[in-house]
Image (tube, rainbow, N blue to C red):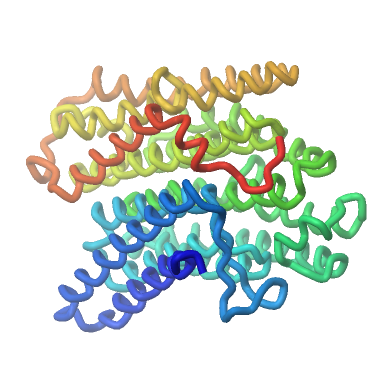
Amino acid sequence: MKHGIEQLVPLAILLSFIGGMANALVFHRTKKSVGVQFISWVCLLLSLTVNISMWRYLGHHKPLEYFFGGWPAPWGITFYVDRFAVAFCTLVSTLSLLSWTYSFHKQPALHRSLFFILQMSLYGMILTQDFFNFYVFLEVCSICLYGLLSDPNEPRSYLSVFRYLAVNTVAASLYLIGLAFVYSQCGSLNMSDLVSLIDLEDLPNKIGIGLMVVGFSIKTALFPLHFWLIDTYGNSKAQNTGFIASIVTKVFCIFLLRIFYSMLGHGEEALKLLSYLGILAWVSIALAPLLASKQKDLRKILAYSSISQIGYIIVGLAEGSSLGLYAAILQIFHHAVVKLTLFFVADEMNSQWGSYDVLHMANLPKHSKLITLACCMALLSLIGIPPLPGFFVKWMLIQSAMTQGHWVVIAIIAIGAMTSLLYTLRMIEIMFFPHTPWTESSSSKPHWNVYAPIAVALVLLMLQVGLLNQLLSWSQLTRYQP
């Protein structure tokens, strides 16, 4: 035991489960919702406290391993917590608290319960060292997404969610088949064991990892496997989609990072597979902003923007360098905060003027200066305007590409930045040079639960610049060799 700190590893998951079950028990008992709201707030705050405590502990100690039931790998399930994992768990708990403050505390008990179970599955996917255990959490995550993305007031959302279910089933099946190939050759699905057991020179292993990567490519919405994301985000409530868009797809990117850098050891065959993903990411970066500029629904603009921004994460991983890896890690943090902020803005716009039409952004400056500032800062960071964190992501990617002579990557980043101007500057122009008259909102000013999370998200966006070096240090991968 290390001062009992290992017992904190499963505690965040347990707290999320307690929050989910507490909300599920009052599904038909609204009179008891006040007590459940208190339990929910306590669970969220304790989860954040637990993750911060592990974060500080791991700054001075070795990574933690927690064996469920006392069974070591490969016989039991192992959770592995290094600075990389706990940094992202802290990100999940922070964004969860902001999302709960903004909207989820007002939602029906069923949605509140699904929110907590989704949070639990995200923690599990980040911490687990077992591929099949990851698949279990993945399925739990998917079920929660189907419920949260369904909107009773938007019938089209049901068709979109059904399509997402079909595509997600294909992706999960590919992942599971890939696991079967790997297990047939290695006899273990524990990531720590596979570091020494797996060999990509063997055809079954190569097929297995390839199928797993294709499954994750669908889930991360890389071009041309992105089609499910547009309708799913575009036909659902922005208050629900914000949390999902900000963190769920990033967890899949995190697991890809674990596979290629921690498990496969940054080998030649691993980099070859990553290079194929990099080519898909190039197309996503260049093409998605063009498609976003043609949309009128702010949710669909943000969906195409997500496809483009995820492309930068994959390009950073495909670079195969320390700078590329750090750029990918910073982009995960950066895009999570930016996208949550912009979906909050979209939901506030809809609640005040009854539409997600981008033209209603003309009303934001008179409605709230704080919301307008947060929106502008997020949009400028997406372009890469210094000194915002989006600039440092692109700068590190360019430095990495120049060092290795990857001139195509530099060209793609330049094209992506220019095409992103088409939709970002369009939105800024609508806000400050409107062509439509001011429309009176349904309420004079936003409530505290709107102001507070948007203000905190704006602070987090700016902190990423000041804490850049520390952020990269906190996010170091164990066993990574550049």
Q: Tell me: 132 left or right of 417.
A: right
Residue 447 appears in view: yes
Q: Tell me: 139 left or right of 333.
A: right
- Residue 452 lies, in percent from the top left, at 20, 45
Q: Tell me: 253 left or right of 469.
A: right
Task: Residue at 33% x, 40% y: name it.
Answer: 341
For the C terminus, the image quarter is: top right
Q: Tell me: 403 left or right of 82.
A: right
- State how many labels appear: 0
- Residue 71 lies, in percent from the top left, at 64, 78
Compared with 68, 429 (above or below) is: above
- Residue 195 lies, in percent from the top left, at 77, 55
* Closest to the observer, 205 or 340: 205
Task: Residue at 14% x, 48% y: name it.
Answer: 448
Residue 236 appears in view: no
Residue 350 quadrant: top left
* Closest to the observer, 402 or 418: 402
* Closest to the observer, 388 or 68: 68
Residue 367 quadrant: top left
Compared with 254, 308 (above or below) is: above
- Residue 179 lies, in percent from the top left, at 76, 65
Residue 302 quadrant: top left
Outermost residue, right side: 202
Compared with 68, 313 (above or below) is: above
Task: Residue at 81% x, 42% y: name it.
Answer: 267
